[in-house]
Amino acid sequence: MGIAYLNGEYLPLEQARISPLDRGFLFADGIYEVIPAYGSVLFRLDEHFERLERSLSEIQLTNPHTRDEWRELFDTLISKNGGGNISVYLQVTRGAPDKRDHAYPTAPQSPTIFAMTSPIAAPAADAPDTAEGLSVITMEDFRWSRCDIKSIALLPNVMMRQHAVQQGCAEAILIRDGFATEGSATNFFIVKDGVVLTPPKSCFILPGITRDLIVELCRDNGVAIEERNVSEAELNHADEIWLSSSTKEVVPVVKIDGKPVSNGKPGPVWKSVARLYVDYKRNLCGES
Ligand SMILES: Cc1ncc(COP(=O)(O)O)c(C=O)c1O
């Protein structure tokens, strides 16, 4: 099960214990991050720090560590778990005061800091010519309107992903007021007539670190890209659809609501962007 970090201690994950009064447990009052490392090198760490700092500040939780302290904690955890291609899950909650009350505790309260690692499965982008692609469904986005905070309150996302899984699909792409927002745990892109489109950042999507990198890679390499809202009709008639996340990187969707996307195979624009992504990763983290 590996070694976890909990409130200053490294210990076997199965021995980690938190109080039932923890506000993460009672109210989902906390935030999280998932940071990939390739060959033990943390990827886009500054961007993850920026998002972590923003999530903490949006819920008025004091950042318990400096960037250097976080970096040391993550590096130690990665090394204790054997290194390699591995992701770090970090969760910070508002701790466990001695009584349950919706309002934030007024007395000083230590946060609960928990981190663990998971191996990263070989992503589709590593082998663009043999990638098969995913099937997705669409469904109503019934989440709240602060999806920009990386909150641990994930029940809607859990329900949406489960709905997809029960229909034999890997992900649900969510529709709010006729426009696609994102996946249950991914951002999305479409390609139409050679132009890549992805929704702009707003309170209805998580500002994905991978999303931003893909936008950057497209811009830097002459791939036409626009950040604008994508209607449900545009999604359904896209030439290509991709999903992105830190652990999935960028993956093609080949079927949506049971219908093939174009010819039902990963598209050419995805293949070029997947290659750009892998090159970028190798430049930063070395061969892995
Ligand atoms: C709702 C949601 N959107 C998008 C993403 C992708 O974000 P990132 O690329 O930072 O992993 C995630 C990742 O967990 C997510 O949960």
Image: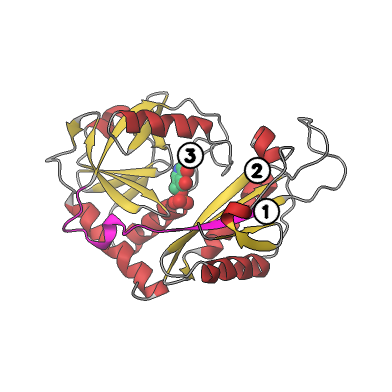
Residue 159 occupies which quadrant of the picture? top left
Q: Mark 3 points at which residue?
A: 205
| Position of 186 relative to 156 (above/below) | below
Colour scheme of this structure image?
Answer: secondary structure
Q: Tag 2: residue type? A: Gly
For the residue carrying disc 3, how many other residues have a C-alpha within 10 Å: few (<14), some (14-19), or many (20+)? many
**CB of mark 3 near ligand 1 (< 8 Å):** yes
Start and end of the magenta stretch? 114-132
Residue 66 vs residue 84: left or right? right
Q: Which mark is residue 113?
A: 1
Q: Tag 1: residue type? A: Ile
Give the spatial CA distance, label 3 vs label 1. Answer: 25 Å
Give the spatial CA distance, label 2 vs label 1. Answer: 10 Å
SS label for mark 3: loop
Residue 27 x/y as whole percent:
67, 33
Q: Name the residue under label 2.
A: 30
| Position of 282 relative to 120 (above/below) | below
Give 208 or 185, whichever is nearer the viewer.
185
